[in-house]
């Protein structure tokens, strides 16, 4: 280590092949996966005369937040799929027509921002028994079902093609066992598997349509419905409020008529209690575990490439996962502060909330720079230095500079390719389960609203 630092103090820029191959194989598909995630929408109160510019800024902010706070995005997407499954079970259980339509409405429009002071129930349940109201509700629901993005061609097939490219690359890597550059590129490819999972899972939710389509579909039934889609990081809390709205009307599966005077007074407001926050933490932790698993796989590959030890790349991975954990738990704490008794406090409480908001934005921006900067440094070769091979190595430690050494070949055989296969297998297991849930939910809804689909 000491000799290398003394005589090779600079860095080795990446050659064209060293940056072009990972860019085309791993990083370009990762960007495509990110763009498959529904973008963040502009709320009505945020719209200005410079709409196009502001929309682009909100669009960029949304994707920066996903990269900086991946656990909340994945947690929200996974909990959306779970909620769809729970709701469709209720949908199949009940017999009353209005309750079926209301449950379907929550399934299809649960991504829309829930506004506490809008009497939606009164409009939705008006004329509950007459044929014209029933026809309008069913027509609106059918429009949403028909407006779903083609999941097969729009989401699933691009991901399958990306996986096919990755499989071909892995097969090619079998002939490059022991090449440290190949191993490090593979570590980044494995790391971005969480984006593949997010791209598919967030589109497995039935409510992954734009708010404009939802508003047009429900225009005749809910003429005053003006809202925007909630970003994935806020999806669980928003869905919980829609669930509360549904349960206010049908506690125990029977209509109570709350919709007739649904102005959301104190008695009908949702109580964010202990069980809610327990589920919130579980959902956030589940999303973080997804990110942490793929990050751990990438860390192990980088840790054993080529010198065994924590280098710049493995530290980059560890720092990203640790910051993501802190951010996803901070999201829960922020929500508790905003909705607990502290929310009605004085200036000191308001300052505390502003501090939490600033802390969240700072950590998200920092984590975004960790993943974006780390990727850029890897492509540019800024981490091709002696110190980056072993950050905490002592001056007398041995480091491997040449590729295809005996230890590198053994590490490739025992770690690199094995971990890559495990990583892709786990990602596809999660994807298959979520796609199966999506198919089941759609089948149940369409078999009721389109009887010709029944066998």
Image (cartoon, helix red, strand yellow):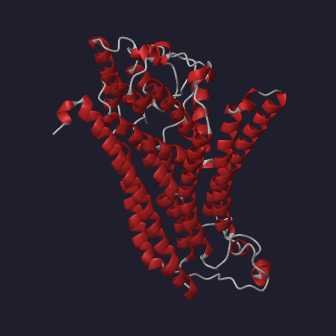
Residue 249 visible in the picture? yes
Furthest residue in direction bottom, as rendered: 406
Task: Please tell me in which quadrant of the rendered image residue 14 appears.
Answer: bottom right
The answer, for residue 18, to whether it is visible in the render is no
Residue in view at x 52 percent, y 37 percent: 39
Residue 32 x, y percent position in the rendering: 47, 48
Position of the N terminus by quadrant:
bottom right
The correct choice, above or below, for 429 with respect to 74 in the image is below
Name which residue lies at 64% across and 52% down: 324
Coordinates of residue 80 in the picture (x, y in percent): 47, 41
**Residue 326 as seen in the image, left or right of residue 157:** right
Q: On screen, 34 above or below 242?
A: below
Q: Would you place residue 96 above or below residue 293 in this image?
A: above
Residue 336, image quadrant? top right
Picture quadrant where residue 361 is located: top right
Which residue is nearer to you in this view: 76 or 339? 339
Above-or-below relation of 241 to 370? above
Q: Is residue 119 left or right of residue 45?
A: left
How many numbered tags mark residues here?
A: 0
Depth order, front residue of 20/337:
337
x 15%, y 40%: residue: 455
Q: Position of residue 110 (x, y in %)?
A: 46, 32
- Residue located farthest toward the left when viewing the structure as drawn: 455
- Left-right relation of 112 to 72: left
- Residue at image location 59% in from the left, 46% down from the top: 278
Q: Position of residue 154 (x, y in %)?
A: 37, 43
In the displayed structure, does residue 224 sit left or right of residue 443?
Answer: right
Q: Camera-side residue: 310 or 271?
A: 271
């Amino acid at each position: 280590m000491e000799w290398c630092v003394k005589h090779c103090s600079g860095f080795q820029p990446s050659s064209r092949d060293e940056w072009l191959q990972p860019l085309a194989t791993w990083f370009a598909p990762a960007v495509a996966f990110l763009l498959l995630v529904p973008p963040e929408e502009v709320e009505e109160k945020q719209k200005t005369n410079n709409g196009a510019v502001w929309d682009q800024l909100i669009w960029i902010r949304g994707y920066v937040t996903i990269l900086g706070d991946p656990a909340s995005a994945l947690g929200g997407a996974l909990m959306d799929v779970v909620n769809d499954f729970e709701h469709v079970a209720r949908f199949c259980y009940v017999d009353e027509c209005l309750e079926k339509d209301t449950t379907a409405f929550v399934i299809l429009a649960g991504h829309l921002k829930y506004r506490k002071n809008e009497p939606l129930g009164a409009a939705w349940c008006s004329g509950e028994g007459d044929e014209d109201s029933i026809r309008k509700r069913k027509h609106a629901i059918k429009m949403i079902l028909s407006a779903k993005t083609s999941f097969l061609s729009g989401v699933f097939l691009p991901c399958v093609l990306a996986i096919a490219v990755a499989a071909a690359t892995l097969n090619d890597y079998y002939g490059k066992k022991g090449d440290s550059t190949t191993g490090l590129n593979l570590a980044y490819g494995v790391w971005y598997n969480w984006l593949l999972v997010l791209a598919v899972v967030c589109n497995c939710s039935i409510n992954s349509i734009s708010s404009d389509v939802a508003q047009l579909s429900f225009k005749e039934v809910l003429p005053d419905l003006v809202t925007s889609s909630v970003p994935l990081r806020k999806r669980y809390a928003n869905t919980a409020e829609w669930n509360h709205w549904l349960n206010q009307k049908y506690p125990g599966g029977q209509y109570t008529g709350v919709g007739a005077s649904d102005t959301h007074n104190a008695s009908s407001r949702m109580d964010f209690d202990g069980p809610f926050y327990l589920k919130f933490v579980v959902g956030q932790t589940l999303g973080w575990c997804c990110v942490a698993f793929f990050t751990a796989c990438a860390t192990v590959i980088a840790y054993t490439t080529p010198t065994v030890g924590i280098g710049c790349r493995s530290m980059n991975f560890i720092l990203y996962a640790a910051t993501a954990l802190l951010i996803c738990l901070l999201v829960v704490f922020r929500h508790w502060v905003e909705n607990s008794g502290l929310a009605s406090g004085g200036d000191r409480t308001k300052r505390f909330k502003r501090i939490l908001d600033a802390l969240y934005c700072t950590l998200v921006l920092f984590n975004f720079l960790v993943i974006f900067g780390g990727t850029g440094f890897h492509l540019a070769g800024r981490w091709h230095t002696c110190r980056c091979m072993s950050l905490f190595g002592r001056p007398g430690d041995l480091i491997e500079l040449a590729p295809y050494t005996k230890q590198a070949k053994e590490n490739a055989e025992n770690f690199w390719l094995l971990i890559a296969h495990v990583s892709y297998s786990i990602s596809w297991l999660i994807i298959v389960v979520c796609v199966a849930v999506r198919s089941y939910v759609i089948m149940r809804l369409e078999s009721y609203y389109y009887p010709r689909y029944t066998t």
